[in-house]
Image (tube, rainbow, N blue to C red):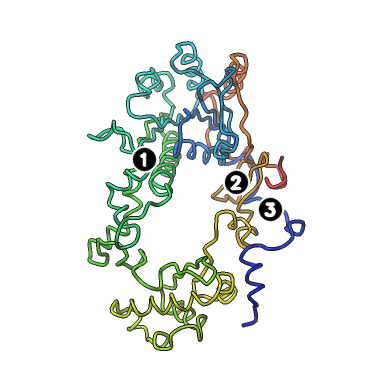
Amino acid sequence: MTRTAADGHARANGATASAARPEHAPPGPVARGPLAGIRVVEFAGIGPAPFAAMLLADLGADVVRIDRPGPGGAPAIDQADTTLRTRTVVAADLKDQEARDRVRDLVDRADVLVEGFRPGVMERLGLGPADLSARNPRLVYARMTGWGQTGPWAERVGHDLNYLSITGMLHAIGPADRPAVPLNLVADYGGGAMFLVTGVLAALVERGVSGRGQVVDTAMVDGVGQLSHVFRAMLADGRWHDERAANLLDGGTPYYDVYACADGRHVAVAPLEAPFYRALIAGLGDDLDPAVAAFDDAARLDPANWPAMRAAFTDAFGRRSRDDWTAVFDGTDACVTPVLAMAEAPRHPHLDARGWTGEWGGHEAPAPAPRLSRSGAARPEFPPRLVGSTAEFAELVGRWDAAAPSTRSAPSTRATAVTREAPSTPNGRTRA
């Protein structure tokens, strides 16, 4: 080995002086973004709907969030919630008729509406898709729920864990004795927010042909179903067992699992293919039981040998610290990586080199993604601008009047304008 354990520790954790850390180029050109000119009205909620609105804002959309008034009339927001970046937040009591009328005036000028209430709530406020689309036929009305707008459970409450449970996917996650409680990345954000954004973008493209908006019914249970395609296909042809920790990708195989190290931290081990597995065995070296090290490929694939392999790997990885193993496997094809804490992750040398995070308004947060080569992403701004007075609201409506939906140019024309106007600026790390 040419790399020392100390080198590996520094590389794993970005352990260089902060003054020496370079300021990285932004993820793609910093511009107005491909959705520049698209107006979005977001009704305040939690979870996937505001996250989807953030993604649209990162792509350049002008997003106005309608929130309830706080003390003194201005909207009250979580000052640490960076998913609210690049927004204008407007205070409006939707139980008040005058406030609802002002919101309708804004939606008349919008391209997209995003809401995450239970079915029927917006209709009871007179803000449902039938009412608003009659006034603005070009409106893409995006709805986010767990169960969907229809079905016997449509009116029920729920959270990510509930939506995941009835799709069969919670049953598939975790150790053999019980399902694990995953972070709400799967149903809320993967099955919900990402599919809402997909539906909005598809509806905007179709509107360019038809000239008409439509309703996007995003149900988290539907999105999770889409995400489960591969596993259901494997189940159907007998390559997946409907039990936990018994399959290729659920920790059933000893070479696709997480192992504890001598310091109590962990490494992720995932060399599924034979050449990568051989690199794992080479890296473990004398720390690995020689009998397991001698297994050929047929023995590796035989489930009868998996308990012995898992025991040998557990013993081997338990002999050194996480960062020692990181140094051993750095630069190899063994698919062994350190399990980093959230606080450690932004300083990993690979993520750091890509400008994976930036700092806006004193808060570090993930940089916009995906990265577009020509139009770039909008520069995130945080905290959001707050609008609490009627006069400020009227000013906002007037700003949108300058580019009302019925008079705006075709998307291809807007894209050309974005390219010409794209500024060259430093990335968000230096933005106050």
**What is the C-alpha distance between the residues marked 3 and 1?**
38 Å
SS for callout 3 = loop
Q: Which of marks 2 and 3 is nearer the N terminus?
A: 3
Q: Residue at x 29, y 33 (%)?
A: 156
Q: Where is residue 288 in the image (x, y as percent from the top left)?
A: 46, 83
Residue type highlighted by circle 1 = His
**What is the C-alpha distance between the residues marked 2 and 3?**
16 Å
Q: Where is residue 111 in the image (x, y as percent from the top left)?
A: 48, 29
Q: Which of marks 1 and 2 is nearer the N terminus?
A: 1
Q: Which residue bears the numbered disc 3?
A: 25
Q: Tell me: residue 403, above or below residue 363.
A: above
Residue type highlighted by circle 3 = Ala
Q: Which of marks 1 and 2 is in front?
A: 1
Residue type highlighted by circle 2 = Ala
* Label disc, if present, on residue 365 of the rendered structure: 2
Q: Which residue bears the numbered disc 1?
A: 159
